[in-house]
Amino acid sequence: MFLLNRGFFVPIICLMAISFLMGNDHTRNPSFQFIHENTEIHSSIDSTVRFDGIIQNVSDEVITVAILRTVNNIPQNWNSSMCIGMSCYSPSIDSITIDISEGDSASCGLSIQINGQGEGVIQLHLFNIDDTSDSINVDISINATLTVSIHENKPEKDLIKKFALGANYPNPFNPSTSISYALINSEMVKLSIYDMRGRLVRTLFRGNQILGYHTMDWNGTDGQGRPVSAGSYIYTIQVGNEVKTKKMTLLK
């Protein structure tokens, strides 16, 4: 993962212009999908809200996805920061790139600090560095009032059949990491950690969860709260009868 600043825009814009002028002789399948929450955020005043999503690599090779904050039209006394997992960067950072392995995924989003009432719009532009026409635009609207109506955070139903499991971040990690996943429906969920010999280390969550984007943290301890040794671990999510797993590494 690479962190970039506003100077990244100039070469990227030139690259996009060249790609457009050259044209495409054929239509390519998208190399990634972006599964995200409701893009309409309703919040109370003087609060911090998040917009989260999961980038899934659906190609058969490693891809590099750039995330640009192309519009940041918010009140002057608000701040928005780009985030990878639960780590958020300076509000001055407008662009980030992430390397995503074949069949893997990464979580990203925004943290928005709201001061007083107001409304704003933020646009994210995601694209494959090697093919700038392989892109997605996401417009997020924020409305902060004294009273808040409840809106469901629904991931895009046409992108996933049941659920999506994101890559934990950071990875490798010490002392803790965040595991993100998205549910298309309210379901019974079980999220567990296993060692490389298949022994259960800890069950992070077991129960019903509502549809939408969820994040669980693991602090490198077992079910009795004892620190585990450094090494690789498997995290597994079971939603109904379906199971997905990913690997992570704890450093000491």
Image (cartoon, grey):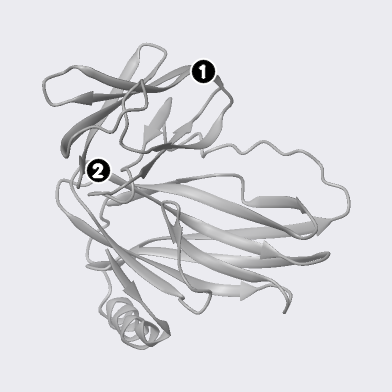
**234 sits left or right of 210 in the view:** left
In the rendered image, residue 85, in percent from the top left (x then y), is placed at: 41, 51
Q: Nearer the viewer, residue 162 or 107?
A: 107
Q: Secondary structure at mark 2?
A: loop
Look at label 1 and name its amino acid. Answer: Glu
Disc 1 crowd rating (10 Å Cα; few below 14, some 14-19, many 20+) is some
Q: Secondary structure at mark 1?
A: strand
In the rendered image, residue 31, in percent from the top left (x then y), is placed at: 27, 52
In the rendered image, residue 44, in percent from the top left (x then y), is placed at: 79, 52
State the image quarter where residue 96 is shown: bottom left
Disc 2 crowd rating (10 Å Cα; few below 14, some 14-19, many 20+) is some
Q: Tell me the residue at 18%/45% (across/down).
A: 102
**On screen, residue 76 above or below 181:** below
**122 sits left or right of 202 in the view:** right
Residue identified by numbered label 2: 104
Q: Tell me the residue at 54%/24% (across/down).
A: 185
Q: Tell me the residue at 33%/72% (across/down).
A: 3
Can residue 57 be seen? no
Residue identified by numbered label 1: 187
**On screen, residue 129 above or below 157:** below
Task: Answer with mark 2 or mark 1, whichever residue precedes in sequence.
Answer: 2
- Residue that lies at the very extreme toward the left in this rendered image: 197
State the image quarter where residue 221 is shown: top left
Q: Tell me the residue at 62%/39% (across/down).
A: 153
Q: Nearer the viewer, residue 229 or 94?
A: 229
Look at label 2 and name its amino acid. Answer: Asp
Q: Nearer the viewer, residue 53 or 20?
A: 53
Q: Nearer the viewer, residue 138 or 29?
A: 138
In what quadrant of the picture does the N terminus appear? bottom left
Can residue 188 be seen? yes
**On screen, residue 178 above or below 122:** above
**102 sits left or right of 127 in the view:** left
